[in-house]
Amino acid sequence: MPSYELYEHAGCVPFADWKAKGIEIPVFDKDGTLTHANQLEFVDEVIEGLKQQQLSSMYPSIGVPSNNHSMEHVRAFAEKLESELDVSVFAICRGQGYKGKPSIEMGLAIARHFDVRLDQLGVIGDRRLTDVRFGRKLGVGAIALCKKAGEGDTKWVPSLRRVEAVIVGTERFAKVAIPSPGY
């Protein structure tokens, strides 16, 4: 079972190290990782971090599995992300009939689309119960758990994340602000 690393945000993930480890396709969560929840606006520090790392030179293609039910919203997001980062985005969502994360269905579709092994995928997300479990169930090569980026979650999400922390474990983290009870 792959372990996960902790980062302040998705723009801090060391993608050059991932590339050296054999990760061929980064798989980004959308809401709370790259954007505000259910929005198309990127979180500036995240996008700037990805640009500074020159993500597109290492990874010209990325995957985005979304639990969002609106195909139109996810397509619009993918187009905007392609333009902003100069990458090709294969985005899929529940609105297309896929089971949501942490079901492995979307991860398998991404691996098939890019013709890579599951251990050549790297998952980047903000939630333990969906993103970390998704990556572990798939058997990906790397998992990055990031502090929730942006605003806009519904009022029940902080309670859900407290439950996540109890279910997954009461980990203590130094130097890295990550999702935990009370955030």
Image (spheres, rainbow, N blue to C red):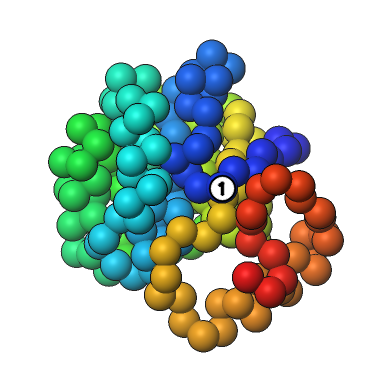
- Residue 30 placement, left or right of 77: right
Query: Which residue in the structure is indicated by mark 1?
Result: 8
Q: Is residue 85 above or below residue 35?
A: above
Q: Amino acid at mark 1?
A: Glu
- Residue plotted at (71% across, 36% down): 2
Residue 116 visible in the shown view: no
Residue 49 visible in the shown view: yes
Which corner quadrant of the image does residue 93 belong to? Answer: bottom left
Q: Secondary structure at mark 1?
A: loop
> Closer to the camera, 104 or 68?
68
Q: Is residue 10 above or below residue 142?
A: below
- Residue plotted at (16% across, 41% down): 83
Q: Position of residue 125 (x, y in %)?
A: 52, 50
> Closer to the camera, 108 or 44?
44
Mark 1, Cα crowd under 10 Å, few <14 / some 14-19 / many 20+, is many
- Residue 137 placement, left or right of 94: right
Q: Position of residue 86 (x, y in %)?
A: 20, 32
- Residue 128 placement, left or right of 1: left
Q: Position of residue 166 (x, y in %)?
A: 80, 68
- Residue plotted at (69% across, 65% down): 180
Instruction: Determine the residue located farthest toward the top in the rendered image.
Output: 20
